[in-house]
């Protein structure tokens, strides 16, 4: 035990490992997964392509064919470079590893995606969180003051934000990008549901990077993320990438999926429609505060002190959502991912019963 205390860095010992609940729930609405699979003929065609995979060979180290297809589908500007990661989590880690030095700061609003803080600590950066306003909007003056004070090496802005679901004000974001002495990463993990993006503005700034992932689009099991930005920045970040980080099966499968992009787009449209329907029903449940969402989940606040009880009651009814309670601004908050219509109904019935 004393060896652990002596050798593991204190900031690592202070962390709590990222928690993933056991699966096996009838209705799993906790992780922003797309609930839809592929039609059978598509699955067959995919399996036929996998048959040609050479598992005895290393993958294409830069996944060139896949990168070209991704550039096209994601609308990456001609002049920008693209880097792929084993999930966008790995790209966040690569950015932190390339920037980390004693005293260097990673800044982000809070609450936001918890991996920023965890990765900052593990890479050896100081994480500074700036509290969002009551409506989860960016507080422009406070944020700019924090930028001035901490001179962050990197700022992460999730757009839309997780777990709150909202898109930040674009003008506030532009002011932050302009005022930032370091990099600003706009994390567009939920782009397919939001329809808004800073991708087209890449050319206007020398410190802006755009992060995307295929996870929330229906390929969470593949682990593929994309970072787009200025060539000179990405050439440096690429140096901390482990060789062959995108495996053979992911390269083939993602390329296949992207050739059938219309299937993913149709699923996303469906999810957005169902988000609207579920939100409308939830807003009729009097004691709830339901926050607007541009993502594939809904954050809501339950009557004071009841979040964990309601979460457990849903669990007993076979419905797993995410309990966000206990993190300051998220007091009494729960988050539900949009699933299939029958799953959304099961969630809604269980929620109404629990209230
Ligand atoms: C889910 C999520 C990610 C991580 O996605 P992966 O590509 O699966 O690693 C990154 N950023 C935000 C804001 C997310 O919600």
Image: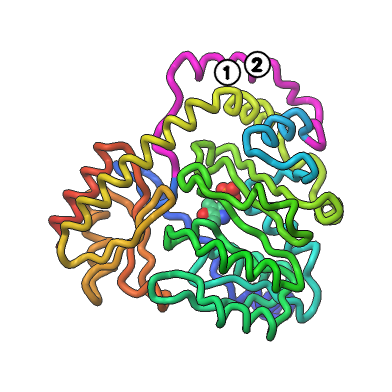
Looking at the image, can residue 245 be seen? yes
Q: Residue at x 71, y 21 (%)?
A: 53
Magenta-span inclusion, residue 50: yes
Residue holding disc 1: 47
Q: What stretch of residues is rendered in magenta?
A: 33-62
Q: Residue at x 59, y 37 (%)?
A: 222
In front here: 35 or 231?
A: 231
Task: Tell me the quarter of the picture where residue 69 sits.
Answer: top right
Residue 292 as seen in the image, left or right of residue 228: left
Picture coordinates of residue 80, whole percent (x, y): 77, 45
Look at the magenta stretch and give its main secondary structure: loop
User: In which quadrant is the N terminus drawn?
Assistant: bottom right
Residue holding disc 2: 51
Looking at the image, can residue 8 be seen? no
Q: Residue at x 18, y 52 (%)?
A: 350
Tag 2–tag 1 contact (CB < 8 Å): yes
In front here: 229 or 330?
A: 229
Q: Residue at x 16, y 49 (%)?
A: 349
> Compared with residue 186, is residue 146 higher up or lower down, i.e. above or below?
below
């Amino acid at each position: 035990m004393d060896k652990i205390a002596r050798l593991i860095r204190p900031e690592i010992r202070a962390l709590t490992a990222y928690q993933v609940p056991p699966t096996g729930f009838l209705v799993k609405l906790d992780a922003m997964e797309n609930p839809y699979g592929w039609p059978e003929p598509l699955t067959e065609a995919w399996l036929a392509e996998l048959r040609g995979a050479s598992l005895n060979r290393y993958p294409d180290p830069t996944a060139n064919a896949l990168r070209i297809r991704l550039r096209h589908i994601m609308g990456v500007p001609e002049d920008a470079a693209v880097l792929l990661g084993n999930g966008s989590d790995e790209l966040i880690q690569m950015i932190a590893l390339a920037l980390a030095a004693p005293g260097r700061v990673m800044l982000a609003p809070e609450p936001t995606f918890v991996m920023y803080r965890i990765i900052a600590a593990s890479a050896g950066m100081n994480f500074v969180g700036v509290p969002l306003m009551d409506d989860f909007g960016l507080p422009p003056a406070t944020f700019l003051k924090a930028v001035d004070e901490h001179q962050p090496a990197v700022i992460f802005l999730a757009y839309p934000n997780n777990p709150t679901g909202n898109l930040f004000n674009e003008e506030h974001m532009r002011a932050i990008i302009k005022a930032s002495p370091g990099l600003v990463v706009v994390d567009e993990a939920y782009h397919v549901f939001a329809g808004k993006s800073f991708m087209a503005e890449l050319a206007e700034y020398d410190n802006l990077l755009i992060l995307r992932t295929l996870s929330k689009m229906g390929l969470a099991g593949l682990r593929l993320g994309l970072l787009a930005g200025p060539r000179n920045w990405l050439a440096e970040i690429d140096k901390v990438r482990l060789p062959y980080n995108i495996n053979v099966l992911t390269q083939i499968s993602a390329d296949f999926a992207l050739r059938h992009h219309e299937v993913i787009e149709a699923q996303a449209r469906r999810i957005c429609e169902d988000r609207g329907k579920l939100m409308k029903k939830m807003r009729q449940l009097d004691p709830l505060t339901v926050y607007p969402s541009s993502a594939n989940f809904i954050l809501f606040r339950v009557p004071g002190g009841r979040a964990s009880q309601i979460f457990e009651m849903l669990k007993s009814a076979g419905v797993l959502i995410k309990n966000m309670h206990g993190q300051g601004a998220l007091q009494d908050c729960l988050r539900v991912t949009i699933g299939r219509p029958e799953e959304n109904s099961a969630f809604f019935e269980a929620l109404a019963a629990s209230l």
